[in-house]
Amino acid sequence: MDSACPPSNEIADLPDSFYPDGKITQLAVSDLKHLSEKKQPFFLAVGYYRPHLPFTPPKKYWDLYNRSKLDTASNPYLPKNGLGFTDWNELRRYGDIPQEGPLTSEKALELLHGYYASVSFSDAQIGILLQELDALGLEENTIVVVCGDHGWNLGEHGLWCKHTNYEISNRTVLMFKVPGGKKNMKTAALSGLIDIYPTLCDLTGIKAPKTVTGVSLKPILTEEREKVQDRIFSFYGEGYSMRTNRYRFTRYRNPQKIWESTISDTVGFYELYDHKLDPSENFNIAYDENNQELLKELEKQMDESLKRQNTDYVDILYLHAPPSKAATLNEEMLNGLRKAKEQGKARFIGLSTHSNQTELIDAALESKLYDVVLTGYNFKQDNIVKSAIAKASAAGLGVIAMKVFAGNYEDKNLAKPINKKAALKWVLNDENIHTAIITIKNFEDLELCKQMMTDIEMNDQEVKDLQASCQTPGLYCLGCEACKLQCPQKLPIPDLMRAYMYTYGYKDVSKARVLLDRLSINEKPCENCSTCVVKCTKGFDVVDRINDISRLKNIPAEFLA
């Protein structure tokens, strides 16, 4: 237990509007009123935090359930010969949860209670939206879809959270409300979240693109057919999982590397569960002698479906952010990438880099294997990087720019925004850049992309804006790595500066936390130095930024979502 970390749940007698989900509902109601006035077709997506951790719905939703009458999972043990395992670190980050071992029955019931209350909280928010649709006269002309994005373990198999390929981790809610459709209809037909888009297209008379891999569920909703597909798929970690009407079949690429946690007595590459005889998935029958022909048939079906859906390969297989030229040219890594391309598992081989770009881009050229370079590139970059990119382009490599907006702002207080339109134009005007990746968080960003399709010529004011931005340190780290040579602690300073930019420039603390979790640093990385000898070439106050950003290590990631 860690009393310094917040608890996994909270019961407070507060109104719905005090919580983020209540505020989201208020905003969605406002959006509905605004959209109704336009008298035009609209699409509105509304996302809720609960029932994600921590379980913190208002008290009135806890009061809906009597904890003493709730039942914990009937199968609090791993499946016989099962491969899937997770240490549920997502939950263990909370102060009231042990760092290892099972939960007490009291804590398990408390979490179960919190989960139920959280679901009821979200259910109430959805009810408010449906009432508003009715009040605005939109109910009979609006399709409503309610869905989750994954399942959740509540002690089943002795596990918590979602990180497995078992049914309990993958099965989620999917409900449609269609004007004129049948009410309270239930179906056992197989369906996946990728089917939502083609279904909406079908219901609204829009022709779905040929690239869509899902299928329309309209024939099921209209009761024209009982099913529209024989198998559906999910993927997690090193495993592909296929669900048929009767079986869940999972194939792991390497059972010894499925999870970071140690797996003992690993029996092989496959899991097979018979939902007719074993709906809770307690017995992996993949290695029963009588099931070998069935196993081969299911694997054949999986391969056929993955190929038909174009999900048996990736367009670009990236070696992500290698730390050096030697890592980029590592012969074992190159052979693996080459083999993936030869086997048709990857169309192109790519290299991504946030720092030390010149050395890594030159290494990509030297290898004669890489087809694409994804690199940080913006108006603050020096001419050396620009020359390396030009050299790569001339040699036939595709060059994709990222970090185009140089951190979005010049300061952590967000008082000095970067001219994003000018920044994107600057990149796209470089003849050696073939395309750019930008983060789209709102309609303004989408509109910016639309404008770039017809106008990338920079005007005088845009040039002046970028020139002014170049005079300040800003939030974007060039990744020159000169600081790493100066730091006696050998800290990954460029990565820490990137986390700082994610937090303040991108306003995405969860992204910063993910990056920090990958770095081998403690919560006070600079505590052993009385003074900082690092001098940033761009003028960053390095120690101040490191101390600022490392505070995130003390906060459970779920609070940062």
Image: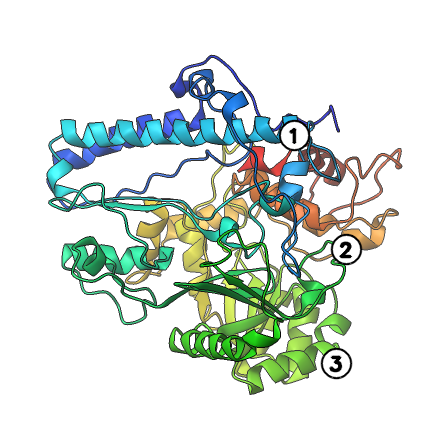
Residue 21 is situated, as x and y percent measured from the top left of the image, at: 41, 29
Q: Is residue 4 left or right of residue 296?
A: right
**Residues tagged 2 and 1 counted as in contact (Cβ below 8 A):** no
Task: Give the Cα separation between the discs numbered 3 and 1.
Answer: 51 Å
Looking at the image, can residue 510 be seen?
yes
- Label 3 and label 2: CA atoms lie apart by 27 Å
Q: Is the residue marked by circle 1 packed among few (<14), some (14-19), or many (20+) residues within 10 Å?
A: few
Q: CA distance from mark 2 to mark 1?
A: 53 Å
Sequence order check, earlier mark of 2 and 1:
1
Q: Secondary structure at mark 3?
A: helix
Q: Quadrant of the N terminus?
A: top right
Task: Give the image quarter of residue 144.
Answer: top left
Q: Which mark is residue 352?
A: none
**Residue marked by disc 1:** 105
Name the residue located 49 percent from the left edge and 54 percent from the top edge. Answer: 167
Quadrant for residue 481, please give it.
bottom right
Residue at image mark 3: 331
Element type where label 2 sits in the image:
helix
Q: Nearer the viewer, mark 3 or mark 2?
A: 3
Along the viewing direction, whichever of 229 and 124 lies nearer the viewer = 229
Q: Is residue 474 visible?
A: no
x and y, in percent, of residue 221 in the image: 20, 53
Q: Amino acid at mark 3?
A: Glu
In contact (CB < 8 Å): disc 3 and disc 2: no
Q: Which residue is tagged 2?
A: 482
Q: Is residue 371 above or below residue 175?
A: below
Q: Position of residue 468 (x, y in %)?
A: 51, 45
- Which residue is most to the bottom? 342
Q: Nearer the viewer, residue 59 or 523?
A: 59
Element at label 1 = helix
Horizontal side, residue 98 vs residue 209: left or right: right
- The image shows residue 172 at horizontal and vertical percentages of 42, 47
